[in-house]
Image (cartoon, rainbow, N blue to C red):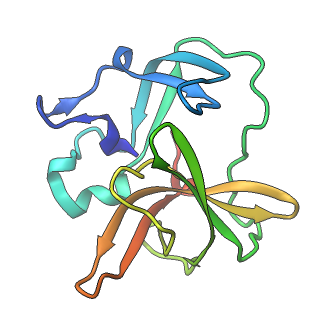
Amino acid sequence: AAHCLWNKRTRSWLVPDAIKFLAGYRRRDFIAHGKVGDYTLADPLVTPNDGARFRPHDWAILHLAEPIDGITGMLPLGLPGTPVRETFRQVKKDKQHILTVDEGCKVDDTPRRDKLLLHKCDAVSGDSGSPILGIAGDTLVVIGVHIATRRYKKGESTGIAILTDSVSE
């Protein structure tokens, strides 16, 4: 999620050197790491200060300074037109240093003009950037990236995600 790269104190985007990538992170351990050399924002002129107008533009692609060899098990992106079963999951951080999976999330996959995906995964503050997963054939695929949670008076909430097929460089 692009807003994760926004420094609220300085009111500016983070410099790429300040961002590290950790693959396979769990309990302060990881299988590989790399430095971010650059990143692409959907629209660098639209900042998190712009409020709700920011949401369709709330994505960023991180470019590693150098390739990382030996990483296996990366999940593919769900491509447009790929049939995805109605079983969805969100991978998130409920406990410090441990990723958990919310299985059986409800996802509204009705096409929307704003390219957003609405979901009922158990998302909370701090889950931005977490993947929304679906199953295409026998493969787990990333169909969206969680960016926000809309809360209602009755304690209900709806998660908002960017569809991965709407992200392009």
Nearest the viewer among 102 and 77 is 102
Answer left or right for 47 relative to 99. left
Label count reads 0
Answer left or right for 84 relative to 66. right
Q: Quadrant of residue 124?
A: bottom left
Residue 104 in the image: above or below residue 164: below
Residue 77 in the image: above or below residue 156: above
Nearest the viewer among 86 and 90 is 90
Name which residue lies at 79% across and 30% down.
72
Answer left or right for 82 relative to 97. right
Name which residue lies at 40% across and 22% down.
19
Position of residue 13 measured from the top left corner of the image (x, y, whole percent): 25, 30
Answer left or right for 135 relative to 10. right
Name which residue lies at 55% across and 25% down.
22
Whether residue 143 is visible here, answered yes or no, is yes
Position of residue 60 measured from the top left corner of the image (x, y, whole percent): 43, 40
Position of residue 74 measured from the top left corner of the image (x, y, whole percent): 73, 38
Name which residue lies at 62% across and 24% down.
30
Whether residue 114 is visible here, answered yes or no, is no
Position of residue 95 measured from the top left corner of the image (x, y, whole percent): 47, 47
Residue 51 in the image: above or below residue 2: below
- Residue at the extreme right: 138
- Residue at the extreme bottom: 154
